[in-house]
Amino acid sequence: MNFLTKKIIKTFVRKTGILLVIVLGLLSIVGTGKEDEDDSNSAPTARIDSPSDSAVFQLDNEVTFTGSATDAEESSITGNALIWSSSVDGHIGAGTSFTTDSLSGGTHIITLTATDNRGLADSTSISITVNPATNTLPTATITSPATGRTFNDGDYIEFTGTGFDTEDQWLSGISLVWYSSKDGQLGTGNSVITNSLSGGTHTISLKATDSENTSNIATITVIIRNTGPTATISYPADGDTFSADQSIPLVGSGVDTEDGNLTGMSLRWTTSSGTIGYGTNITVDNLPVGENTINLIVTDKGGLADSDTITITVK
């Protein structure tokens, strides 16, 4: 390699090295353009202050909506971070308060959605009715079963009811919609029959809607007898022995006919001293020397519980 070639290479290395140092320095100052992840951010909580749920207004009347949101990280959420929408009219406003006289006639589900500056959101809803002055609101009536009835899982249940409107007379078909608080829409018409209600307590609603799109809702409560879960401790085995300085894994399961495999807070581990953890797999330290009774208690969504118990020895 001749002298001129060596000089060119040294000059290139020196200059590119300086350039690399400058670039790295700039990157350390301005960063990569990505903010560090903040796993501690919590979602806001939205609240509608007025109008009250189920309020009724005349068509073309002014309706004032007020609401707010609290957030652990932000002092206040205002403006376009608070969005109001109607199930009938779509977007209707923004901010902590606004007034409108342009709501369409009918029953509206009004939703306030609050979004914090990290993009987490919360929504809350109410129902209001905007009724033309010439219209009478319909009435809904559930005729059977009686409220409070109890059924076995898998029973066929027929729900019957009526809807009446002064202008439209007797309502039928899609003007009558049935809902369960646990399982969603059940069907339409004067009666629906189902044998697939999930276990637990259901609020059954019949919503009657007239030709002006105004609604009335009747409700009853029914109870579906729940099948209890099964708790199983799979490790350790009953009678196992461990040393005092050993961390002991506890593994178990909870299975329920209606809910499937139970997880998380549905599985509670206890000893004679109280609760020691939750979930399908935990590790316990510092059990007292001697015999220890370990319990796994599993609880399904309907509130029924089962337990499994083992005894282990710590030496």
Image (cartoon, helix red, strand yellow):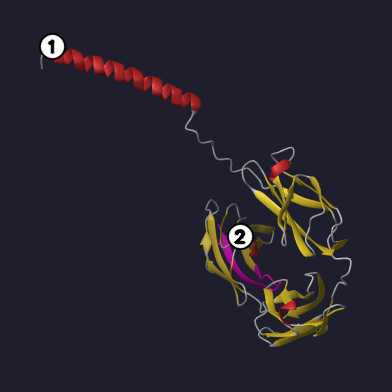
Report if residue 60 is visible in the image: yes
Where residue 95 sits, quadrant-wise, is top right
Q: CA distance from mark 2 to mark 1?
A: 84 Å
Q: Nearer the viewer, residue 229 or 87?
A: 87
Q: Which residue does the numbered mark 2 point to in the structure image? A: 290
Give the residue drawn at x 70%, y 38%. Answer: 74
Where residue 279 sits, quadrant-wise, is bottom right
The residue under label 2 is which amino acid type?
A: Gly
Give the residue drawn at x 61%, y 61%. Answer: 264
Residue 226 in the magenta stretch? The answer is no
Q: Counting residues from the N terminus, which is met first, the one under dot 2 or under dot 1?
A: 1
In this picture, residue 228 sits left or right of residue 18: right
Disc 2 or disc 1, which is closer to the eye? 1
Q: Which residue does the numbered mark 1 point to in the structure image? A: 3
The residue under label 1 is which amino acid type?
A: Phe
Q: Secondary structure at mark 1?
A: helix
Predominant SS of the magenta segment:
strand
Read off the magenta span.
298-315
Q: Nearer the viewer, residue 252 or 71?
A: 71
Report if residue 147 is visible in the image: no
Give the residue drawn at x 64%, y 68%. Answer: 298
